Image: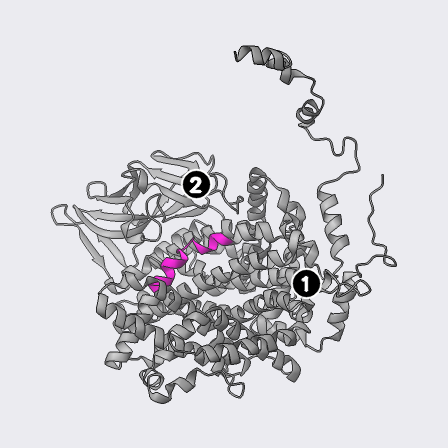
Amino acid sequence: MTRLSTVNTKDSPVLIPQKLINKERQDSKLQIDEINTFLESNPEKQSLTHQLIDQIVNDPILQTDTKYYDQTKDQQREITAKKIARLATYMEHDIKTVRAQFRDNDLIKQLQSSSSSSVLPLTNKDISLFDKRLSLVANIDPQLGTRVGVHLGLFGNCIKGNGTDEQIKYWLQTRGAAFIKGIYGCFSMTELGHGSNVAQLQTTATYDSKLDSFVINTPDLTATKWWIGGAAHSATHTVCYARLLVEGKDYGVKTFVVPLRDLETLQLLPGISIGDIGSKMGRDGIDNGWIQFRNVIIPREYMLSRFTKVIPSENGSDKVTVKTQPQLDQISGYSALLSGRVNMVMDSFRFGSKFATIATRYAVGRQQFAPNKNSTELQLIDYPLHQYRVLPQLTIPYLVSPAAFKLMDTYYSTLDELYKVSSSSPANANGLKVVSEKLKNLFIDSASLKATNTWLISTLIDELRQTCGGHGYSQYNAFGKGYDDWVVQCTWEGDNNILSLTSAKSILKKFVDSATKGKFNNSLDEDSFNYLNPKFIMKVFTPSGDSTSIIDDDDLYSYTKIWEVSLVKILAFIGKSIERSRDVDSVSKLLVMVSKFHAIHSMLKTYHNKLTNNDPHDKSFINDQYTQETMWNIYKLFSIYFIDKHSGEFQQFKILTPNDISKIIQPKLLELLPKLRKDCIALTDSFKLPDAMINAPIGYYDGDIYHNYFNEVVKNNPVEKDGAGIAPYHKILSDMLTRGFEFDAKLGGSSNKDILSMLNK
């Protein structure tokens, strides 16, 4: 029988979904180009984003379709390797593009030359184009983004953050790591027995003064390096986090470059043991492995020595000298993770927009149930409950975007400042102090935003999967693999709960200093921590302070300010609780909440400032009045939705009363939903994601849900061929169904009640 491949548009009780979606698209007055410029930060970044997306989705090696969902682990590994090789050529191309050098001398050859002094060394600007490309690639193929990100973002950034200028040039340029050639790196931080507690890692690097070298050892099983991306098959080198032991003294965990494999054969080097971790919940294209070291000797120069140096004695009789810069040494150990955390906030915007698009388009195109038998079935999005399930999730990527771009800019500017002050000789003491404080603030913001947003997007993916019913459970509609690939973000490069605690403890310290000592650094803290200004804290606790917590549509900032009030009141409660109990761990639950509230506040404040053009360096580019009103409604709904989600805490800490929740917050929530519902298709179109990036047929732009979905299923599972529908294990099934009377025979024949009664006498 020939399969049906079309819908009977005349008699079908379900309307053609593309008509529903296209009608809403035509009826919307939103200026999606303006919104997309807002979401992509500015016109220049917007243009670059779409140029790169176009290259990625049309590249025959990099493009990804629904076959992606059926690949085995081995297939994913092999295909990912081919894609890495493709990206390596883009890396060279992108560096040459930034430098505008495609003629005459080969730029990459010059950069790799150890003797060339005529060409400037690589900078963050040189790799910014490729970083953008990699971020977009990660949205359609997360495991590919991670495989390359481990090499460049972890291995490379660890060297950049901890190495001297000479070491940076040697490993990244001369040896070729920055160009994905010469060597391929992995990042050996986590161990079987320790992950987030980096200070207690047990791998050792013992200095041998006779050899002027370090001996790297895995002292026991729990010190085995674990979850090391790229270790199982790819990496030729690793940056290893190990305890520096010099003449019996433990100087804590430092970083060392350790060769793992022969560059030509990829055979393991002496003393190196490596295994594959095997199948995971997601991202099987990443060759995660474990590593053990047995008396592996590396030159002293392979210790990354920007902030800690081991200086051998000149005549062999003096003691070995260890010099360290304590102000930055501890921070430097975590510097490589900063890049990953910052990028995960950007990933939250990209992933959130993808899955919000799929679910929203499906909600508009899908019809289910009718008010009566003579009526047309209703669109899912017209049910108030469905609006509540979908539309607040749609606001999340909108609010993440400005915060993600701002965090990225702060990250690059702060690291540039760090390199500048730490490279001067002698070191700029005042400059080091300032940049150290900036780094601490960056750690707080990146930890809070990374943890909160990766949690938010993992919830978003699963909640929106459920709104798509059974079709959302199909692997071909992206939610299943998308969730499995995403949720690792909640635990790697800093477990979210630990990151939240660390972030909140630092915020608490700032609060105590401000509230009890009046200490507040206007130049460094006013941006992210304005709610910790002593004047604001005092205002919150004055009799009229409660008025600062009421939402007021005439004061749009009030939707942000309410979170500032909540943070102050919760921090005050935590401070008093610790003062009584002397036990910080007893308030861990509240500290995690402080980190979440800080992230929500950061997103609201950044969005508000951008939309009001308060920051001259970060304009909104929204000129149309109706579009601006809609953008404000997104801002309001985001704030109101999470106030309602945390209504218990808002009442517990007397930020809002029960009457405020029932008479102001919840009615406002129900008022905003239908306002955004009428423009929800245009709001997804504003992300400007091509179908090849979405890779989910129920969410394609044309809205032809049923044809698109059916055709992808049949394409990947063809039925019209010889033997279709016959399983390779069919004999097991047929033997079961055609079995004879073996059951009775095996029991000695048919049971006879007379015989049985005699046996019982």
Q: Can residue 179 be seen in this view?
A: no
Q: Distance between the residues labelled 1 and 2?
A: 41 Å
Q: Is mark 2 on a helix, strand or loop?
A: strand
Q: Is residue 232 visible?
A: yes
**Drawn side of residue 264 relative to residue 506, left or right:** right
Coordinates of residue 180 in the picture (x, y in percent): 50, 50
- Vertical order, 131 against 751 (above or below): below
- Of 124 and 687, nearer the camera is 687
Residue topped by disc 1: 363
- Of 228 and 307, nearer the camera is 228
**Drawn side of residue 128 relative to residue 655, left or right:** right
**Labels 1 and 2: the sequence-earlier one:** 2
Name the image quarter holding residue 381.
bottom right
Mark 1 vs mark 2, foreground winner is: 1
Work out which residue is located at the far right of the displayed protein and give it.
10
Look at 16% across and 46% down and name the residue there.
248
Q: Do the residues labelled 1 and 2 touch (CB within 8 Å)?
A: no
Look at 60% across and 79% down and name the residue there.
621
Whether residue 75 appears in magenta in the rendering, the answer is no
Disc ID at residue 289: 2
Name the image quarter holding residue 12.
bottom right
Quarter of the figure with the N terminus? top right
- Vertical order, 677 against 231 (above or below): below
- Of 134 and 599, nearer the camera is 599
**Drawn side of residue 422 relative to residue 528, left or right:** left
- Vertical order, 37 against 107 (above or below): below
Q: Residues within 10 Å of mark 1 (few under 14, many from 20)?
A: many
Name the image quarter holding residue 169.
bottom left
Look at 68% across and 77% down and name the residue there.
30
Stretch of the chain drawn in magenta: 487-503
